[in-house]
Image (spheres, rainbow, N blue to C red):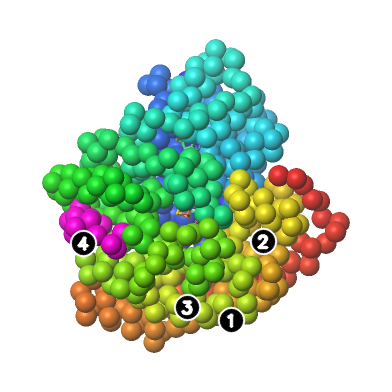
Amino acid sequence: MRLYLINPTNPLVSSVTAKESRWNRYRVWKPLSLMVLAGLTPPEWEVVIVDENLGAPDYPAMPRPDLVGITAFTSQAPRAYEVAAYFRSLGVPVVMGGIHATMCLEEVLAHVDSVVTREAEGIWPQVLADTRQGGLKRQYDGGFARISEFAPARHDLLPTGYAFGAIQTTRGCPLNCTFCSVTAFNGAQYRQRAIPDVVSEFQAIREKRILVVDDNLIGTRPEHIARAKDLFRALAHANLHKQWIAQATINFADDEELLTLAAKAGCRGVFIGFESPSPEGLRELGKKFNLLKGRDFRASVRRIQRHSILVVGSFIIGLDLDQPGIGQRIAEAASQYGVDTLNTLFLTPLPGTRLWDQMKSEDRIALTAFPEDWKYYTLTFPVARYKHLSVDRIIQEMIACNRRFYSLPRLLRRVWGGFWRRHHPLLSLVGNLSYRNNSRVDCMTYADFQRQWHDFSSPNRMQTQA
Ligand code: B12
Ligand code: SF4
């Protein structure tokens, strides 16, 4: 039995990044979901993982599979449906799973033979058994997996050449920010894998650098932090010589022992969502966790950096309270906090989020010709109608934000500061140049997007309910 597991590209993202940027963002990260599915697949199946971010293969030249499994974030859905249509035209059954399939079940069912909602661990062997017996069902629900019983991902199935390997150590987030899909998709309960399993999977990863994909590696409660410390101790003890980056909330900075252990375990960078420069903005986004009284973001960032851990700060433009000038304000706030690199995104209603429900009820979702328009749901296009910012204005704000933060004098000052404080100046330089370059490529993409904007708003364009 032959199984193809496919990560579809987003042509919009990859056509820009592959052709014009040396730092193709989506080539560096491995599709962990498919490696996990492969790990859950019994040995009688021959598994091939296809990551279209490396270039779509010549499918007709490949041997005919018995089953195709496709994963997709929302922004990948249009291409996912093209791939599904091709294999279905050959009579090969196609099953789709992942976040988009879960949040837009009806739409996805119209394009594939079978859909697996939520997490696959508990149900994938059943899907494969049903396929073998010719009884594939239209719909399966995996629910929330018992994370303590994870099978290790198949890290051997993708070619080398990615900048980062990938691993997951926890799932779920209790915070449920308005714009984020994680609580709706993975649940509010923070679930942690057994530490020895994580260490041995770390060991199995060939890449020297690893992305820990957890939405919040350290969690929010004292027992989560205690577990994170145990994990870091175990990783340091195993002496793996791996460097890794992760996502965490700002409380990462609050515990010196945690930071020391993280650095010893190989942590080199952390991605932190600051989201908005103002407390009102944080309240609007439901990110109350960042509102802790007396929090000094600059001091917190410095404490992390003192352990030679770089900080990537993430912000969002397009909140209801954001007025013209917000781009500059974000750049200033990020500089003031002292983050090493800044990643600013447009507020985007993703299906299944609280923000989606709110904007939908207020008729503020602008790009609604689905599934085609999903390709713009990358958080790098303004797909909604924002309260105080027209489409041209919000794009200007984004450009102003990046121009200011990544201006050469600021960039050099940051990198020099890092050099002085000895926290990985080379990494900081590469990160800054990469973001600076990407933001220039984005300007060209915005120009195309703006040219097409009047078509987007045309009443003749098909409106499809998600
Ligand atoms: C790592 C990550 C990335 C990596 C992706 C690497 C890769 N190629 O997979 C990078 C950094 C590239 C990335 C990019 C983006 N990401 Co991202 N990312 C994540 C993150 C943090 C973890 C995903 C992960 O690897 N999980 C571990 C695996 C094991 O879990 P999983 O993918 O959910 O897979 C399980 C199930 O879903 C299911 N499953 C999945 N696929 C399939 C397929 C089949 C056939 C079956 C049966 C089951 C199945 O089985 C798996 C095991 O249970 C998630 C947050 C999250 N918790 O999901 C956000 C998340 C997926 N990203 C998100 C977004 C918005 C993006 C971007 C669009 C925007 C951005 N700038 O971040 C871009 C995508 C651009 C594009 N290509 O179009 C959103 C997606 C929401 C949505 N509705 O699409 C999420 C949920 C975060 C959020 N805040 O809401 N991301
Ligand atoms: S943005 Fe981060 S903290 Fe907020 S719900 Fe998503 S994963 Fe949790």
Q: Under tag 2, what secondary structure?
A: loop
Residue 257 is a magenta residue? yes
Where does label 1 land, which residue? 325
The image position of residue 419, as x and y in percent, is: 23, 78
Packing grade of label 4 (10 A; few <14, some 14-19, many >=20) is few
Q: Quadrant of residue 94?
A: top right
- Residue farthest to the top? 133
Task: Identify the main secondary structure in magenta.
Answer: helix
Spatial CA distance of label 2 from label 1 is: 20 Å
Nearest to viewer (mark 4 / mark 2):
4
**Do tag 3 and tag 4 residues touch (Cβ < 8 Å)?**
no
Q: Earlier in the sequence, mark 4 or mark 2?
A: 4
Q: Earlier in the sequence, mark 4 or mark 1?
A: 4
Q: Decide which of 291, 117 is in the foreground and name it.
A: 291
Where does label 2 land, which residue? 383
Q: Earlier in the sequence, mark 3 or mark 4?
A: 4
**Do tag 4 and tag 1 residues touch (Cβ < 8 Å)?**
no
The residue located at (33%, 79%) in the rendering is 414
The magenta stretch spans which residues? 252-267
Spatial CA distance of label 4 from label 1 is: 36 Å
Where does label 4 land, which residue? 256
| Badge 4 amino acid | Glu
Spatial CA distance of label 3 from label 4 is: 28 Å
Q: Earlier in the sequence, mark 2 or mark 1?
A: 1
Where does label 3 land, which residue? 331
